[in-house]
Image (spheres, rainbow, N blue to C red):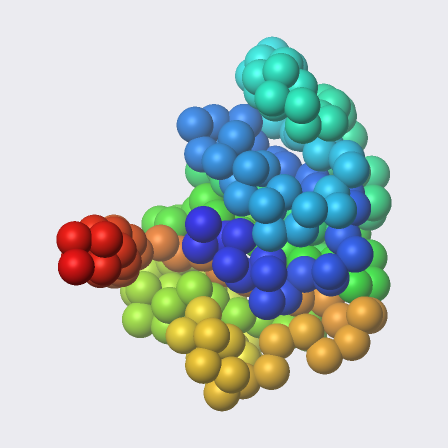
Amino acid sequence: ADSALGSRYLSRPDAHTLVVAGAGGLAPWLVRGHCIARSGIKRVLIWNRTAEKAHQLEQALSDEGIPAETIDDLEQAVRQGDIVSTATMSKEPIIKGGWLKDGAHLDLVGGYAPDTREADDAAISGHKLFVDCMESALDGVGDILNPLERGVIAKSDICGDLFDLAWGTVAGRESDGDITVFKNAGGAHLDLMVARALIERLEQKAS
């Protein structure tokens, strides 16, 4: 849901091709979330380090009516992607900035430890960079911390987080050609927010 909300603010409304790198337990939920945020998605391209897991995910999504297919060449898939979502534990970047086409939205979900990276420096710098929550994204998340420590980006290069986007205090996508990058760092605050929202709904029903 965190990535879906980021996509709703930052991806192009006419996005039709979703690329997912990683076929673990989170991957099907990312696909469902992005497809809800962007109902025009017509292709879901799945890449995984081991092709067998990608094929299993393809079958599971196809059974739900989601048009999924397994791909072997991640670069060629990314070059087609309107939305690229990653959920891996890679320690070396698997997404290169030069692969992202104009108008693409990159959703980085894995790599929550300091020694992990999913995107290279070119993907992180030079584009419109957002995070889900500023505090958690700056707390040891490799895709942000590593380029910050090496001076590739400055904290001021982060345009804002979901709170800023929701309140309208920062601009999200401003043109069809913008390449947007969203680091979904996760955190316990998400559990708290969901629990609070559910409690408020139950209280409203009870009243």
Viewer-side residue, 136 vs 125: 136
Residue 75 falls left or right of residue 167: right
Viewer-side residue, 51 vs 83: 83
**In the depicted structure, whether residue 24 falls above or below residue 79:** above
Residue at x 49%, y 87% (from the top left corner)? 169
Residue 139 falls left or right of residue 121: left
**In the depicted structure, whether residue 44 falls above or below residue 49:** below
Give percent across and percent down for residue 174.
72, 79
Give percent across and percent down for residue 139.
30, 64
Question: Which quadrant does the C terminus fall into?
Answer: bottom left
The furthest residue to the front? 207
**In the depicted structure, whether residue 59 falls above or below residue 47:** above
Give percent across and percent down for residue 141.
38, 58
Residue 195 falls left or right of residue 165: left
**In the depicted structure, whether residue 16 falls above or below residue 128:** above
Q: Quadrant of residue 46?
A: top right
Viewer-side residue, 4 vs 204: 204
Viewer-side residue, 179 vs 64: 64
Res. 39 visible in picture:
yes
Residue at x 56%, y 37% (from the top left corner)? 32
Give percent across and percent down for residue 26.
45, 34
Residue at x 45%, y 50% (from the top left corner)? 1
Residue at x 79%, y 63% (from the top left corner)? 103
Residue 137 falls left or right of residue 66: left
Q: How many marks?
A: 0
Res. 51 visible in picture:
no
